[in-house]
Amino acid sequence: MTDILATVAALEDKSLLVLDDDLSLRTRLGRALEQRGFEPTTVGSVLEAISAIAAHAPAFAVLDMRLDDGSGLKVVEALRAARPEARIIMLTGYGNIAAAVQAVKAGAVDYLSKPADADDVVRALMAEGDASAAPPVHPMSADRVRWEHIQRIYELCDHNVSETARRLSMHRRTLQRILAKRAPK
């Protein structure tokens, strides 16, 4: 990790945009990336992010996929238009293959699931060329991935338990028991 930090220190442009609607996560990630040598600008909405890009297009970006006022993919498009060589990492609490493909097609260089460790974010931002970073040291457990998938489908079905159960080919009562439990670690 020290050689990556040395690479960050040697960068000419260390500007970084951090977009997340969770204030505590955004603040913590911004501070952690600042300690690792970046110059972060933190914002909490798509509108704020697009304004920040218009003022100064950063060399790096760490963007949340799903926000209260839209999708982080809009910000990817705006940043790609303003600065095509920018390195963009997408973060999301709803890790799935379709969203990862969508993010990469839009122009992100990597896709990480929340909660992402700051060192994992730096490795992804500094990966050589189009190579992706090494797998995270503490990936989500299989139970957590299953829970995240169920939560995503439940949200897409507008919190309709019967429709979610039908789409997941699961008994409605089984789904209700799963939804009533806390998220696994």
Image: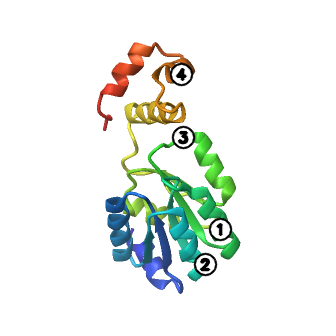
**Mark 2 and mark 3 residues within 8 Å of each other at the beta carbon:** no
Q: Position of residue 139 (x, y in %)?
A: 40, 45
Q: Which mark is residue 163?
A: 4
Front-most of residues 16 and 72: 72
N-terminal of the pair, mark 4 or mark 2, is 2
Dot 2 falls on a residue whose secondary structure is: helix
Dot 3 falls on a residue whose secondary structure is: loop
Examine the rendered structure and indicate whether residue 130 appears above or below residue 57.
Answer: above
Using the numbered discs, state the Cα–Cα distance from disc 3 to disc 4 in whole angstroms.
Answer: 20 Å
Q: How many marks?
A: 4
N-terminal of the pair, mark 2 or mark 3, is 2
Amino acid on which disc 2 is placed: Ala
Can you identify the residue that label 1 sits on? 78
Can you identify the residue that label 3 sits on? 96
Amino acid on which disc 3 is placed: Asn
* Mark 4 or 1, closer to the camera: 4
Examine the rendered structure and indicate whether residue 105 appears above or below residue 51.
Answer: above
Using the numbered discs, state the Cα–Cα distance from disc 4 to disc 2 in whole angstroms.
Answer: 42 Å
Can you identify the residue that label 2 sits on? 54
Using the numbered discs, state the Cα–Cα distance from disc 1 to disc 2 in whole angstroms.
Answer: 9 Å
Amino acid on which disc 1 is placed: Ala
What residue lies at 49% left-to-right and 74% top-to-bottom?
16
Q: Is residue 143 left or right of residue 149?
A: left
Dot 4 falls on a residue whose secondary structure is: helix
- Residue 59 visible in rendering: no
Quadrant of the rendering where the N terminus is positioned: bottom left
